[in-house]
Amino acid sequence: MRRLLTRLWRALRPVQSRVMWCLNAKFVVGVTGVVRDDEGRVLLLRHRMWPPGRQWGLPSGFAHKGEDFRQTVVREIKEETNLDVEAGRLVLLNSGFRTRLEVAYEARLLGGELRIDSFEILEARWCRPDELPAGLQPVCHPLVRGETAP
């Protein structure tokens, strides 16, 4: 039986990736950027579409199909804040959700003028790690402190 399955698998070589795609889980990837300024403050956004009482968080969004996650950080921060950043060190990789994978990178501020996308963002604020707004998403606390999240 094993030999037969092995021969069958080898015969499927031209379509193996499609077979694997059909048999395995599919995920959307949420990508977050932890942006700090020269004073050590972190950029926090109050997101319009997030649940009331938990609207504060870091700049984030979903990766496009085939997009490098570092590029997602750069794109999402530009779209939401008009700021230019460079993605740095990976600080979070979390799975275990039903259909979602979470990724976060540190992001170095390069420039730009802070201007929010009012469709998605209600408010933007530079905050010291010890002066965070109420309603900050729990996963953000360790990231703001420079720790990796659980």
Image (tube, rainbow, N blue to C red):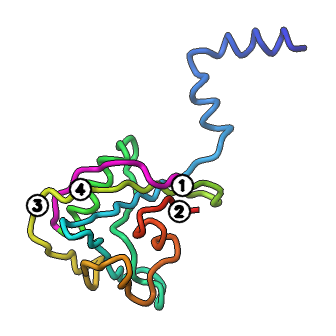
Report whether 109 appears left or right of 43: left
Q: Secondary structure at mark 1?
A: strand
Q: Amino acid at mark 2?
A: Ala
- Dots 4 and 1: beta carbons under 8 Å? no
Residue 26 to residue 31: above or below:
above
Q: Secondary structure at mark 2?
A: loop
Q: Which residues are magenta?
A: 82-93
Report whether 34 appears left or right of 140: left
- Residue 40 position in % (x across, y down): 26, 69
Q: CA distance from mark 4 to mark 1?
A: 23 Å
Looking at the rendered image, the quarter that the C terminus falls into is bottom right
Mark toward the start of the polypeptide (1 vs 2): 1
Q: Secondary structure at mark 4?
A: strand
Q: Main secondary structure of the magenta part?
A: strand
Mark 4 closeness class: few <14, some 14–19, many ≥20 residues within 10 Å: some
Which residue is identified by label 1? 101
Any mark on residue 111, and which?
3
Q: CA distance from mark 4 to mark 3?
A: 9 Å
Any mark on residue 149, and which?
2
The furthest residue to the right = 1
Q: Secondary structure at mark 3?
A: strand
Mark toward the start of the polypeptide (1 vs 3): 1
Question: Residue 77 occupies which quadrant of the picture?
Answer: bottom left
Looking at the rendered image, the quarter that the N terminus falls into is top right
